[in-house]
């Protein structure tokens, strides 16, 4: 009864996407979800790997802007949700973790697959709720169960603060399946009633917070739009360095153009994470920094922010001389990037990103790996208007990107039938989440998702960091680049996933097709450090 009530209330609260990992202790929830899926009340996705399942749910939540749930058995199964929970926390993604648990009296007794699951995710969750153990035939529990589910969904969706992950821990005692002769649908039908009309037991109204900050645009100003940046039409005329996930912006400014400028004021939207020139600018005590956003954990790494609010209350206009100077610097940086790429014979991730960004079309959803691909895209863009860009930039890990892309594609299929989802990622990111390719024959599959993998046989990003300096060459290849020597097309064939190997200039044509498929591009990382230095030098002259 308890599992049926929980699933019924999830649906009433608007949850439509649920990922389930098989297990024994979560059997009551699994059977209730199977019945709801069969009735068309929600869409169920079954996955074997809990870590990937968490990122699949995260991708579904990103694609729908509503909470998605992931359900698993007890023990290490719950702990495997840690990376996805941390990403959802820092990125503000509504994620519900429904963890099946053993009765509390078994904790600490040596019972198999039993750990203390309460507060397992610490401060990373918006709420940590534990249901009491079900008592048969006690209908007074109906309201408490339904209220707890509503509380969990509201907290995940951002009631009273930013959206994020929530853990709803559900202790379940044996028997874990219905009695003899009772079918899945019959068990699910035995549910205490919710509110009349099909609505949630407790409707939580979302609040808003408005704190305008006065901004004088006559001062030489740039906008830095980072991950999660919301719309700011009042700042449309201001030259803007926008990371790919910040969305399309007017008056775009190439990040390398900052080397040719000396702004006196910076307005930060979202959370900037990609460019060192941006970090240096934000740390300059001579620059006035204004941070806009509703999250109380506003971004201010160097501690230089002068004002924080939710939106700009502008006065004055961008000076013509400043707008013209920024436009010239932007043109120079883009010209320098394109010129160095054209002069470089060896294919790199930058070449792949440039080819891909030019092939995107309005309506596409692009999911980008958090290592070099997102940086390559930022340097070679811009992203065409009408393209939605997602990336796990909350904690900027490479884990779960394939799962996130599959979740985003499944959501995109439902909300925009006939639309295309494209993912750009490196080989290590692809290998890190290869279990995401294990999709059962009866599970929902993306209608049009192409994974573009730039394969340089290792961690190319370390070539560009301090440890990539030639003086560390004796240890670099093994300790940092970590070549794997893997045959990615063979891996795809093992999972029944079509894979095509192409050159960077063949990427646009290779995007055509349907279903889940991989476009594999061999790239090189030797010489990458020198090529980036040439681009920066040419852009800054």
Image (cartoon, rainbow, N blue to C red):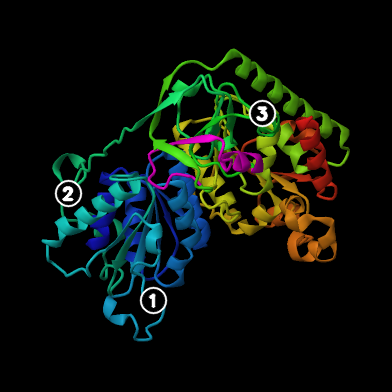
Residue 373: name its quadrant: top right
Residue at screen point 69% across, 57% down: 494
Which quarter shows the C terminus?
Answer: top right
Give the secondary structure at mark 3. Answer: loop
Contact between marks 2 and 1 (CB within 8 A): the answer is: no
Position of 142 compared to 470: left or right?
Answer: left
Nearest the viewer among 329 and 90 is 329
* Residue 471 percent location from the top left of the image: 84, 60
Residue matched to label 2: 194
Residue 290 among those drawn in magenta: yes
Which quarter shows the N terminus?
Answer: bottom left
Residue matched to label 1: 115
Residue matched to label 3: 261
Position of 461 compared to 208: left or right?
Answer: right
Q: Check the image and report above or below for 407 versus 182.
A: above
> Which stretch appears magenta?
276-300
- Residue at mark 1 to residue at mark 3: CA–CA distance: 56 Å
Depth check, mark 2 against mark 1: the one in front is: 1
Mark 2 vs 3, N-terminal side: 2
């Amino acid at each position: 009864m308890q599992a049926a009530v929980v699933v019924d209330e999830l649906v009433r609260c608007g949850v439509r996407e649920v990922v389930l990992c098989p297990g024994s202790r979560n059997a009551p929830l699994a059977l209730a979800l199977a019945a709801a899926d069969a009735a068309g009340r929600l869409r169920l996705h079954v996955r074997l790997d809990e870590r990937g399942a968490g990122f699949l749910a995260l991708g579904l939540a990103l694609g729908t802007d509503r909470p998605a749930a992931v359900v698993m058995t007890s023990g290490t199964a719950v702990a495997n949700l840690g990376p996805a929970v941390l990403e959802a926390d820092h990125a503000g993604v509504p994620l519900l973790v429904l963890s099946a648990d053993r009765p509390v009296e078994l904790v600490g007794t040596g019972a198999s697959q039993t750990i203390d699951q309460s507060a397992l995710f610490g401060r990373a969750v918006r709420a940590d709720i534990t249901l009491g153990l079900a008592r048969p035939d006690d209908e007074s529990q109906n309201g408490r169960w339904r209220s707890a589910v509503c509380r969990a969904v509201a907290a995940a969706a951002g009631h009273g603060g930013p959206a994020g992950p929530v853990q709803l821990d559900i202790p379940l005692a044996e028997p874990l399946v219905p009695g003899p002769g009772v079918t899945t649908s019959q068990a699910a039908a035995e549910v205490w009633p919710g509110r009349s009309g099909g609505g949630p037991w407790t409707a939580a109204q979302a609040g808003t917070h408005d704190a305008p900050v006065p901004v004088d645009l006559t001062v030489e100003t740039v906008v830095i739009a980072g991950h999660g940046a919301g719309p700011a039409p009042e700042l449309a005329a201001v030259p803007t360095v926008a990371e790919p996930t910040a969305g399309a912006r007017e008056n775009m400014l190439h990040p390398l153009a900052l080397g040719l400028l000396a702004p006196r004021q910076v307005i930060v939207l979202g959370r900037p994470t990609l460019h060192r020139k941006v970090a240096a600018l934000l740390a300059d005590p001579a620059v006035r920094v204004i941070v806009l956003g509703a999250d109380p954990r506003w971004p201010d790494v160097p501690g230089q922010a002068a004002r924080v609010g939710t939106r700009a209350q502008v006065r004055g206009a961008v000076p013509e001389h400043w707008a013209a100077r920024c436009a010239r610097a932007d043109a120079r940086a883009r010209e320098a990037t394109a010129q160095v790429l054209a002069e470089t014979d060896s294919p790199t991730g930058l070449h792949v990103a440039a080819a891909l960004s030019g092939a995107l079309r309005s309506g596409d959803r692009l999911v980008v790996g958090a290592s070099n691909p997102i940086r390559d895209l930022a340097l070679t863009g811009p992203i065409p208007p009408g393209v939605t860009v997602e990336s796990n930039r909350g904690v900027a890990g490479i884990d779960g990107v394939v799962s996130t892309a599959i979740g985003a594609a499944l959501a995109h299929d439902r909300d925009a039938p006939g639309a295309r989802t494209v993912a750009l990622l490196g080989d290590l990111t692809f290998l890190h989440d290869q279990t995401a390719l294990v999709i059962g024959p009866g599970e929902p599959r993306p209608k049009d998702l192409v994974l573009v993998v730039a394969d340089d046989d290792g961690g190319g990003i370390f070539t560009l960091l301090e440890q990539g300096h030639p003086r560390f060459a004796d240890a670099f290849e093994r300790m940092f680049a970590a070549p794997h020597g893997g045959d990615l097309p063979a891996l795809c064939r093992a999972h029944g996933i079509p894979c095509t190997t192409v050159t960077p200039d063949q990427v646009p044509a290779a995007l055509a097709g349907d279903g889940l498929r991989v476009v594999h591009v061999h790239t090189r990382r030797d010489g990458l450090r020198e090529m980036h230095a040439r681009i920066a030098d040419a852009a800054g002259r």
